[in-house]
Amino acid sequence: MIIILKETATPEQISELRGAMVARGLVVQDIVGEEKHMMGLAGDTSALSQEGLERYGFVDRVMKVSEPFKLSGRHFHPEDTAISITDSAKIGAGSFAVIAGPCSIESEEQILSIARDVKRGGASMLRGGAFKPRSSPYSFQGLGLDGLELLKIAREKTGLPIVTELMSSEYLSEFERDVDIIQIGARNMQNFSLLRDVGRLGKPVLLKRGPSSTIEELLMAADYILYGGKSNVILCERGIRTFETATRNTLDVSAVPVLKKKSHLPVVVDPSHGTGYWDLVYPMALASAAAGADGLIIEVHDRPEFALCDGQQSITPVLFDKLMRSVTAVREAVSEQ
Ligand code: PEP
Ligand code: MN
């Protein structure tokens, strides 16, 4: 629901109304336009009526928002959101970020060497899984907290902010303290208690689209995080499950402009998981940049044939360098249009 206030509404009246809405357990988002002040309300608004609200003399009218997502939607927040980690790592509202690194952290030598490679290539953030959501319980599960320590060493040596997946609320405090962007993996996109927990931390969250989730479900999951009022969200298209078997997943490139239309949040694409094959990563990364993505997340390994996880979809540092140059050229070509 959006409450449109009269131009004559005073700051005291606005704060009185805000207080009354917060007391009902609603999340209030101010939408300040050039002429009008509006208030977006998220939560259970079923007990609020148009007539009741218009009894506040400074309320002009009330608008129902039919979409089931509110805080991630453009009605409540028309401007693009920019998320800034450091001066050189910004994403959204015109800033493009490439997050690159191995699927999993395997050793200090491995993560350091790849971190240096991707930094040289122009990545602005480093990825690496410490806790791995593997389909088989017999596959490598990641180094856990030891892996996180190695990732921190790589950050210290390269200056690259770190992005890594949190699989359960057990390690919330370690992630809050140590990680720059908390990744919520595709399989956990609808783990609502985990979403609520990360929403209370105040750390940016990279939320990956579930393999069988619609765009609307992705945005509702983002609302769970935003509802906590503290954490910002980066949306990630990483391929969906379809009848096609030639690729690991079907990368939904059209999700990029659709998400950009519906939401103010930055959108990144993961062509590594989105295709499952290293030789498809380059063309799909370019397609994603052309489609208007705000960034990419790419798996890079210096020896993909020996990778403990996802080697078949990891590109080498040499191909990563080429990809970065081409992505820049594509972005320039698109912005000239
Ligand atoms: C990952 O990024 O390493 C990963 C497991 O991704 P997803 O959750 O998209 O499968
Ligand atoms: Mn992976």
Image (tube, grey):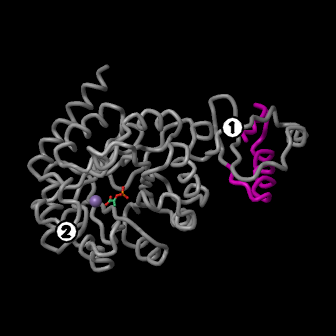
Q: Is residue 236 above or below residue 334?
A: below
Can you give x and y, in whole percent of width and height, for residue 73 in the image? 57, 41
Quarter occupied by the N terminus: top right
Residue occupying image coordinates x 31% and y 47%: 274
Q: Is residue 89 above or below residue 196?
A: above
Q: Quadrant of residue 302?
A: bottom left
Position of 333 with respect to 249 (left or right) is left
Q: Which mark is residue 141?
A: none
Query: Viewer-proximal residue, 173 or 322?
Result: 322
Position of 84 with respect to 259 (left or right) is left
Q: Quadrant of residue 326?
A: top left
Task: Name which residue type carries label 1.
Answer: Ser
Ligand 1 found in image quarter: bottom left
Task: Name which residue type carries label 2.
Answer: Leu
Residue numbers of the magenta segment: 1-28
Q: Secondary structure at mark 1?
A: loop
Position of 313 with respect to 293 (left or right) is left
Question: Label 2, on which residue?
Answer: 308
Query: Viewer-proximal residue, 104 or 248?
Result: 248
Asked if disc 1 and disc 2 are in contact, CB closer than 8 Å, the reply is no
Query: Viewer-proximal residue, 314 or 244?
Result: 244
Check if residue 10 falls in the magenta segment.
yes
Q: Disc 1 to disc 2, how far (Cα)?
A: 46 Å
Q: Which mark is residue 66?
A: 1
Can you give x and y, in whole percent of width and height, for residue 114 in the image? 15, 61
